[in-house]
Protein backbone atom coordinates (compact mmCIF):
# COMPACT_ATOMS: atom_id res chain seq x y z
CA UNK A 1 0.00 0.00 0.00
CA UNK A 2 2.82 2.41 0.82
CA UNK A 3 4.42 1.81 -2.57
CA UNK A 4 1.10 2.37 -4.36
CA UNK A 5 0.61 5.65 -2.51
CA UNK A 6 4.16 6.73 -3.37
CA UNK A 7 3.48 6.14 -7.08
CA UNK A 8 0.73 8.79 -7.01
CA UNK A 9 3.24 11.58 -6.31
CA UNK A 10 3.82 12.58 -9.95
CA UNK A 11 0.74 10.95 -11.49
CA UNK A 12 -2.71 12.43 -12.08
CA UNK A 13 -5.19 12.21 -9.21
CA UNK A 14 -7.15 8.97 -9.04
CA UNK A 15 -9.66 7.41 -6.65
CA UNK A 16 -9.04 5.26 -3.59
CA UNK A 17 -10.27 2.24 -5.51
CA UNK A 18 -7.45 2.59 -8.03
CA UNK A 19 -4.79 2.87 -5.31
CA UNK A 20 -6.17 -0.22 -3.56
CA UNK A 21 -6.22 -2.10 -6.87
CA UNK A 22 -2.63 -1.04 -7.57
CA UNK A 23 -1.59 -2.26 -4.11
CA UNK A 24 -3.06 -5.72 -4.85
CA UNK A 25 -1.22 -5.80 -8.20
CA UNK A 26 2.09 -5.00 -6.48
CA UNK A 27 1.40 -7.72 -3.93
CA UNK A 28 0.57 -10.26 -6.65
CA UNK A 29 3.88 -9.55 -8.40
CA UNK A 30 5.91 -10.69 -5.37
CA UNK A 31 7.47 -14.15 -5.35
CA UNK A 32 5.83 -15.08 -2.06
CA UNK A 33 2.39 -13.80 -3.12
CA UNK A 34 0.88 -17.29 -2.85
CA UNK A 35 1.67 -17.45 0.88
CA UNK A 36 0.15 -14.02 1.66
CA UNK A 37 -3.54 -13.70 2.47
CA UNK A 38 -5.03 -10.57 0.91
CA UNK A 39 -7.23 -8.64 3.39
CA UNK A 40 -10.80 -7.78 2.60
CA UNK A 41 -11.73 -4.73 0.56
CA UNK A 42 -12.97 -2.82 3.61
CA UNK A 43 -9.73 -3.57 5.46
CA UNK A 44 -7.69 -2.26 2.55
CA UNK A 45 -9.75 0.92 2.49
CA UNK A 46 -9.14 1.45 6.22
CA UNK A 47 -5.43 0.79 5.68
CA UNK A 48 -5.38 3.44 2.96
CA UNK A 49 -7.08 5.98 5.23
CA UNK A 50 -4.37 5.42 7.84
CA UNK A 51 -1.34 5.47 5.55
CA UNK A 52 -2.41 8.29 3.22
CA UNK A 53 -2.66 10.97 5.91
CA UNK A 54 -1.03 14.17 4.67
CA UNK A 55 -0.05 12.75 1.25
CA UNK A 56 -3.01 14.10 -0.81
CA UNK A 57 -2.93 10.77 -2.68
CA UNK A 58 -6.44 11.31 -4.09
CA UNK A 59 -6.56 15.09 -3.75
CA UNK A 60 -4.91 18.01 -5.49
CA UNK A 61 -1.98 17.07 -7.74
CA UNK A 62 -0.16 20.34 -7.04
CA UNK A 63 -0.45 19.83 -3.29
CA UNK A 64 0.80 16.26 -3.69
CA UNK A 65 3.88 17.39 -5.61
CA UNK A 66 4.57 20.10 -3.03
CA UNK A 67 4.43 17.57 -0.18
CA UNK A 68 6.71 15.18 -2.07
CA UNK A 69 9.29 17.93 -2.65
CA UNK A 70 9.65 18.65 1.05
CA UNK A 71 12.79 17.51 2.85
CA UNK A 72 12.64 14.06 4.37
CA UNK A 73 12.08 13.91 8.10
CA UNK A 74 11.45 16.76 10.52
CA UNK A 75 12.51 20.20 9.40
CA UNK A 76 12.34 23.65 10.96
CA UNK A 77 12.77 27.31 10.21
CA UNK A 78 15.86 29.47 10.47
CA UNK A 79 15.50 31.43 13.73
CA UNK A 80 15.18 35.19 13.38
CA UNK A 81 16.45 36.94 16.50
CA UNK A 82 16.18 40.59 15.41
CA UNK A 83 13.95 42.67 13.11
CA UNK A 84 15.17 42.55 9.52
CA UNK A 85 17.49 39.60 10.05
CA UNK A 86 15.28 37.39 7.85
CA UNK A 87 12.55 38.80 5.62
CA UNK A 88 10.50 37.19 2.87
CA UNK A 89 9.04 38.81 -0.25
CA UNK A 90 6.47 37.54 -2.72
CA UNK A 91 3.81 38.66 -5.18
CA UNK A 92 0.28 37.33 -5.71
CA UNK A 93 -2.93 38.42 -7.48
CA UNK A 94 -5.35 40.33 -5.24
CA UNK A 95 -8.91 39.03 -5.34
CA UNK A 96 -10.40 42.50 -5.85
CA UNK A 97 -11.48 44.25 -9.05
CA UNK A 98 -10.07 47.75 -9.49
CA UNK A 99 -11.26 50.49 -11.83
CA UNK A 100 -8.18 51.48 -13.84
CA UNK A 101 -7.60 54.83 -15.55
CA UNK A 102 -9.06 53.57 -18.82
CA UNK A 103 -12.30 52.63 -17.05
CA UNK A 104 -11.54 48.91 -17.31
CA UNK A 105 -12.19 46.66 -14.31
CA UNK A 106 -9.19 44.41 -13.75
CA UNK A 107 -7.44 42.59 -10.95
CA UNK A 108 -4.15 43.89 -9.59
CA UNK A 109 -1.12 42.20 -8.08
CA UNK A 110 -0.12 42.50 -4.44
CA UNK A 111 3.58 42.51 -3.58
CA UNK A 112 4.46 42.40 0.09
CA UNK A 113 7.32 41.71 2.46
CA UNK A 114 7.09 40.17 5.94
CA UNK A 115 9.60 40.21 8.79
CA UNK A 116 10.08 36.79 10.39
CA UNK A 117 11.15 38.09 13.80
CA UNK A 118 8.15 40.34 14.42
CA UNK A 119 5.69 38.84 11.91
CA UNK A 120 4.95 42.40 10.83
CA UNK A 121 4.26 43.63 7.31
CA UNK A 122 6.60 46.60 6.69
CA UNK A 123 5.18 47.47 3.27
CA UNK A 124 2.91 46.29 0.47
CA UNK A 125 2.25 47.74 -2.98
CA UNK A 126 -0.52 47.22 -5.54
CA UNK A 127 0.24 47.34 -9.25
CA UNK A 128 -1.62 46.18 -12.41
CA UNK A 129 1.47 44.10 -13.22
CA UNK A 130 4.40 43.90 -10.83
CA UNK A 131 7.73 44.90 -12.33
CA UNK A 132 11.27 45.05 -11.01
CA UNK A 133 10.91 48.79 -10.33
CA UNK A 134 7.85 48.08 -8.15
CA UNK A 135 9.81 45.55 -6.08
CA UNK A 136 12.57 48.13 -5.63
CA UNK A 137 9.96 50.68 -4.54
CA UNK A 138 8.77 48.16 -1.96
CA UNK A 139 12.26 48.07 -0.47
CA UNK A 140 12.26 51.86 -0.22
CA UNK A 141 8.88 51.87 1.52
CA UNK A 142 10.00 49.30 4.09
CA UNK A 143 12.85 51.53 5.30
CA UNK A 144 10.82 54.76 5.16
CA UNK A 145 8.34 55.85 7.86
CA UNK A 146 4.69 55.74 6.80
CA UNK A 147 3.41 59.29 7.17
CA UNK A 148 -0.09 60.01 8.42
CA UNK A 149 -2.61 60.81 5.71
CA UNK A 150 -5.75 62.97 5.71
CA UNK A 151 -8.72 61.05 7.05
CA UNK A 152 -6.73 58.61 9.17
CA UNK A 153 -7.58 58.34 12.83
CA UNK A 154 -5.25 60.04 15.30
CA UNK A 155 -5.03 56.71 17.13
CA UNK A 156 -2.87 55.41 14.26
CA UNK A 157 0.00 57.79 15.04
CA UNK A 158 3.24 56.22 16.20
CA UNK A 159 3.26 58.61 19.13
CA UNK A 160 -0.04 57.05 20.27
CA UNK A 161 1.21 53.47 19.92
CA UNK A 162 3.32 51.30 22.21
CA UNK A 163 6.36 51.73 19.97
CA UNK A 164 9.32 53.59 21.56
CA UNK A 165 8.48 56.79 19.68
CA UNK A 166 10.53 59.22 21.78
CA UNK A 167 13.62 57.03 21.61
CA UNK A 168 13.33 56.62 17.84
CA UNK A 169 12.52 60.28 17.18
CA UNK A 170 16.16 61.20 17.70
CA UNK A 171 17.15 58.82 14.90
CA UNK A 172 14.73 60.13 12.28
CA UNK A 173 12.74 63.36 12.54
CA UNK A 174 10.16 62.05 10.05
CA UNK A 175 8.82 59.78 12.80
CA UNK A 176 7.17 62.82 14.40
CA UNK A 177 4.30 62.61 11.89
CA UNK A 178 4.59 58.89 11.17
CA UNK A 179 1.94 56.22 11.50
CA UNK A 180 2.37 53.25 13.83
CA UNK A 181 3.98 51.00 11.24
CA UNK A 182 7.38 49.48 12.11
CA UNK A 183 10.31 50.70 10.04
CA UNK A 184 12.61 47.71 9.46
CA UNK A 185 15.86 47.66 7.51
CA UNK A 186 16.23 44.23 5.83
CA UNK A 187 19.42 42.27 6.30
CA UNK A 188 18.51 39.14 4.29
CA UNK A 189 15.53 38.76 1.95
CA UNK A 190 14.24 35.34 0.88
CA UNK A 191 12.45 35.24 -2.48
CA UNK A 192 11.42 32.78 -5.18
CA UNK A 193 12.65 32.62 -8.77
CA UNK A 194 10.13 35.09 -10.17
CA UNK A 195 11.47 37.33 -12.91
CA UNK A 196 10.79 40.40 -10.77
CA UNK A 197 12.97 39.27 -7.86
CA UNK A 198 15.90 37.81 -9.81
CA UNK A 199 16.12 40.76 -12.20
CA UNK A 200 19.22 42.92 -12.36
CA UNK A 201 17.21 45.95 -11.22
CA UNK A 202 16.07 44.35 -7.98
CA UNK A 203 19.49 42.81 -7.30
CA UNK A 204 21.13 46.20 -7.80
CA UNK A 205 18.69 47.78 -5.33
CA UNK A 206 19.55 45.13 -2.75
CA UNK A 207 23.29 45.66 -3.25
CA UNK A 208 22.86 49.44 -2.89
CA UNK A 209 21.09 49.01 0.45
CA UNK A 210 23.49 46.29 1.64
CA UNK A 211 20.82 43.57 1.59
CA UNK A 212 21.64 39.91 0.99
CA UNK A 213 19.28 38.18 -1.44
CA UNK A 214 18.58 34.48 -0.82
CA UNK A 215 16.51 32.73 -3.53
CA UNK A 216 14.73 29.53 -2.55
CA UNK A 217 14.98 26.27 -4.44
CA UNK A 218 12.75 26.03 -7.48
CA UNK A 219 9.22 24.69 -6.89
CA UNK A 220 9.71 25.00 -3.12
CA UNK A 221 7.08 27.46 -1.82
CA UNK A 222 7.33 25.92 1.66
CA UNK A 223 10.77 27.52 2.05
CA UNK A 224 9.03 30.90 2.30
CA UNK A 225 5.78 29.74 3.83
CA UNK A 226 5.42 32.78 6.10
CA UNK A 227 4.92 35.27 3.27
CA UNK A 228 2.72 32.76 1.42
CA UNK A 229 0.43 32.53 4.44
CA UNK A 230 0.58 36.27 5.10
CA UNK A 231 -0.50 37.22 1.59
CA UNK A 232 -3.19 34.55 1.75
CA UNK A 233 -4.50 36.09 4.96
CA UNK A 234 -5.03 39.40 3.17
CA UNK A 235 -7.99 37.82 1.35
CA UNK A 236 -9.78 36.87 4.58
CA UNK A 237 -8.80 39.88 6.67
CA UNK A 238 -8.97 42.66 4.07
CA UNK A 239 -10.07 41.78 0.53
CA UNK A 240 -13.48 40.31 1.32
CA UNK A 241 -14.49 43.53 3.07
CA UNK A 242 -13.70 45.63 -0.03
CA UNK A 243 -16.15 46.39 -2.83
CA UNK A 244 -15.34 44.31 -5.90
CA UNK A 245 -14.18 41.18 -4.06
CA UNK A 246 -14.12 38.30 -6.54
CA UNK A 247 -13.31 35.29 -4.37
CA UNK A 248 -10.34 33.02 -4.84
CA UNK A 249 -11.75 31.15 -7.87
CA UNK A 250 -14.29 31.52 -10.67
CA UNK A 251 -16.92 29.36 -8.98
CA UNK A 252 -16.86 31.70 -5.96
CA UNK A 253 -17.18 34.88 -8.00
CA UNK A 254 -20.37 36.93 -7.99
CA UNK A 255 -22.10 38.30 -11.06
CA UNK A 256 -22.02 41.82 -12.44
CA UNK A 257 -19.02 42.97 -10.42
CA UNK A 258 -17.60 44.91 -13.37
CA UNK A 259 -20.70 47.11 -13.49
CA UNK A 260 -20.73 47.89 -9.79
CA UNK A 261 -18.92 50.48 -7.72
CA UNK A 262 -15.18 49.81 -7.64
CA UNK A 263 -12.20 51.53 -6.04
CA UNK A 264 -9.46 53.09 -8.09
CA UNK A 265 -5.91 51.83 -7.67
CA UNK A 266 -4.66 54.80 -5.55
CA UNK A 267 -7.74 54.58 -3.31
CA UNK A 268 -7.32 50.86 -2.77
CA UNK A 269 -3.61 51.37 -2.02
CA UNK A 270 -4.51 53.94 0.63
CA UNK A 271 -7.06 51.56 2.18
CA UNK A 272 -4.47 48.78 2.25
CA UNK A 273 -1.87 51.02 3.92
CA UNK A 274 -4.38 52.07 6.58
CA UNK A 275 -5.41 48.46 7.21
CA UNK A 276 -1.77 47.36 7.62
CA UNK A 277 -1.33 49.95 10.37
CA UNK A 278 -4.71 49.51 12.02
CA UNK A 279 -5.70 45.89 11.45
CA UNK A 280 -2.56 43.84 10.78
CA UNK A 281 0.34 45.31 12.74
CA UNK A 282 -1.23 44.99 16.18
CA UNK A 283 -2.93 41.62 15.79
CA UNK A 284 -2.81 39.41 18.84
CA UNK A 285 -0.50 36.43 18.49
CA UNK A 286 -0.44 33.07 20.23
CA UNK A 287 1.89 34.49 22.89
CA UNK A 288 0.59 36.25 25.97
CA UNK A 289 1.92 39.47 24.38
CA UNK A 290 1.24 40.70 20.87
CA UNK A 291 3.72 40.69 18.02
CA UNK A 292 3.97 44.44 18.48
CA UNK A 293 5.12 43.86 22.07
CA UNK A 294 7.81 41.53 20.76
CA UNK A 295 8.92 44.20 18.29
CA UNK A 296 9.34 46.63 21.20
CA UNK A 297 11.57 44.15 23.03
CA UNK A 298 13.79 43.81 19.98
CA UNK A 299 13.92 47.54 19.43
CA UNK A 300 14.95 48.00 23.06
CA UNK A 301 17.91 45.71 22.50
CA UNK A 302 18.81 47.30 19.15
CA UNK A 303 18.56 50.96 20.14
CA UNK A 304 19.98 50.85 23.67
CA UNK A 305 22.78 48.36 22.77
CA UNK A 306 22.21 46.50 26.04
CA UNK A 307 21.82 42.74 26.35
CA UNK A 308 18.65 41.88 28.23
CA UNK A 309 18.76 38.86 30.48
CA UNK A 310 16.27 36.19 29.56
CA UNK A 311 13.58 35.74 32.20
CA UNK A 312 11.27 32.86 32.97
CA UNK A 313 9.20 31.86 29.97
CA UNK A 314 5.50 31.15 29.68
CA UNK A 315 4.39 27.51 29.86
CA UNK A 316 1.14 26.54 28.20
CA UNK A 317 -0.42 23.15 27.57
CA UNK A 318 -3.01 22.47 24.88
CA UNK A 319 -4.35 19.70 22.65
CA UNK A 320 -3.78 19.83 18.90
CA UNK A 321 -4.43 17.54 15.92
CA UNK A 322 -1.57 15.96 14.03
CA UNK A 323 -1.35 16.81 10.32
CA UNK A 324 1.65 15.95 8.14
CA UNK A 325 4.08 15.79 11.08
CA UNK A 326 3.54 19.48 11.93
CA UNK A 327 1.34 20.84 14.68
CA UNK A 328 -0.56 24.12 14.22
CA UNK A 329 -0.58 26.08 17.47
CA UNK A 330 -2.77 29.09 16.66
CA UNK A 331 -0.48 31.25 14.47
CA UNK A 332 2.54 28.92 14.60
CA UNK A 333 3.43 25.29 13.98
CA UNK A 334 5.89 22.94 15.61
CA UNK A 335 7.70 19.89 14.26
CA UNK A 336 7.06 16.32 15.35
CA UNK A 337 10.04 14.01 15.97
CA UNK A 338 10.25 11.06 13.62
CA UNK A 339 9.57 8.25 16.12
CA UNK A 340 6.86 9.93 18.16
CA UNK A 341 3.63 7.95 18.30
CA UNK A 342 0.21 9.04 19.45
CA UNK A 343 -3.25 7.44 19.74
CA UNK A 344 -5.29 7.94 16.58
CA UNK A 345 -8.93 8.88 16.15
CA UNK A 346 -10.27 8.50 12.60
CA UNK A 347 -6.76 8.69 11.19
CA UNK A 348 -5.79 11.87 13.05
CA UNK A 349 -3.64 11.69 16.15
CA UNK A 350 -3.57 13.94 19.17
CA UNK A 351 -0.59 14.92 21.27
CA UNK A 352 -0.22 17.05 24.33
CA UNK A 353 2.05 19.99 23.59
CA UNK A 354 3.92 21.99 26.21
CA UNK A 355 5.10 25.23 24.64
CA UNK A 356 7.80 27.28 26.38
CA UNK A 357 8.45 30.78 25.06
CA UNK A 358 11.09 33.17 26.37
CA UNK A 359 9.60 36.53 27.25
CA UNK A 360 12.57 38.36 25.69
CA UNK A 361 13.70 36.38 22.66
CA UNK A 362 10.17 35.25 21.85
CA UNK A 363 11.30 32.94 19.06
CA UNK A 364 12.84 30.16 21.14
CA UNK A 365 10.37 27.32 21.60
CA UNK A 366 10.67 23.90 23.17
CA UNK A 367 8.08 21.23 22.49
CA UNK A 368 7.50 18.52 25.09
CA UNK A 369 5.33 15.56 24.11
CA UNK A 370 3.31 13.76 26.77
CA UNK A 371 1.02 10.79 26.53
CA UNK A 372 -2.61 11.59 27.42
Image: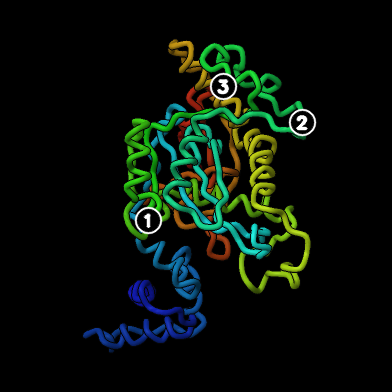
Q: What distance separates the C-alpha of mark 1 from that of mark 3? A: 35 Å
**SS of the residue under disc 1:** loop
* Mark 3 Cα-neighbour bin, 10 Å: few <14, some 14–19, many ≥20: some
Q: Residue at x 67, y 19 (%)?
A: 159
The answer to whether residue 372 is visible is no
Where residue 150 appears, x then y in whole percent? 74, 33
273, 69: nearer the viewer:
273
Where residue 59 appears, x then y in whole percent? 50, 73
Tell us which disc is closer to us: 1 or 3: 1
Of mark 3 and mark 2, the one earlier in the sequence is 2
Mark count = 3
Q: Which mark is residue 296?
A: 3
Residue position for label 2: 153
Where residue 113 appears, x then y in whole percent? 49, 42
Residue located farthest toward the left when viewing the structure as drawn: 31
Q: Indicate whether 255 appears above or below 358.
A: below
Of mark 1 and mark 3, the one earlier in the sequence is 1
Circles 1, 3 touching at the beta carbon (< 8 Å)? no
**SS of the residue under disc 2:** loop
69, 58: nearer the viewer:
69
Q: Residue at x 33, y 74 (%)?
A: 3
Residue position for label 1: 195
> On the picture, is 249 further left or further right than 149?
left
Which quarter of the picture shows residue 1?
Answer: bottom left
* Mark 1 Cα-neighbour bin, 10 Å: few <14, some 14–19, many ≥20: few
Where residue 225 appears, x then y in whole percent? 46, 50
Q: Residue at x 53, y 28 (%)?
A: 183
Of mark 1 and mark 2, the one earlier in the sequence is 2
Q: What distance separates the C-alpha of mark 1 from that of mark 2? A: 38 Å
* Mark 2 Cα-neighbour bin, 10 Å: few <14, some 14–19, many ≥20: few
Amino acid sequence: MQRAIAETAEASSKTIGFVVWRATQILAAREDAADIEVPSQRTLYRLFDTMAIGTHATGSATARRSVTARPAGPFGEVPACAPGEWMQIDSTPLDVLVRLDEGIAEKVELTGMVDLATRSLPAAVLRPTTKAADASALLARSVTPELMRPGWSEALRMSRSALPHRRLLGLDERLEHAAARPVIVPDTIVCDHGKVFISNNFRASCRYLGISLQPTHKASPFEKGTIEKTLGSVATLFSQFVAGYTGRSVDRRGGGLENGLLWSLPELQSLLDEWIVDGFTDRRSSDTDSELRRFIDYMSVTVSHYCLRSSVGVVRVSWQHRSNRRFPLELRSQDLPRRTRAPTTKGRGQLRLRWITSSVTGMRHRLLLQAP
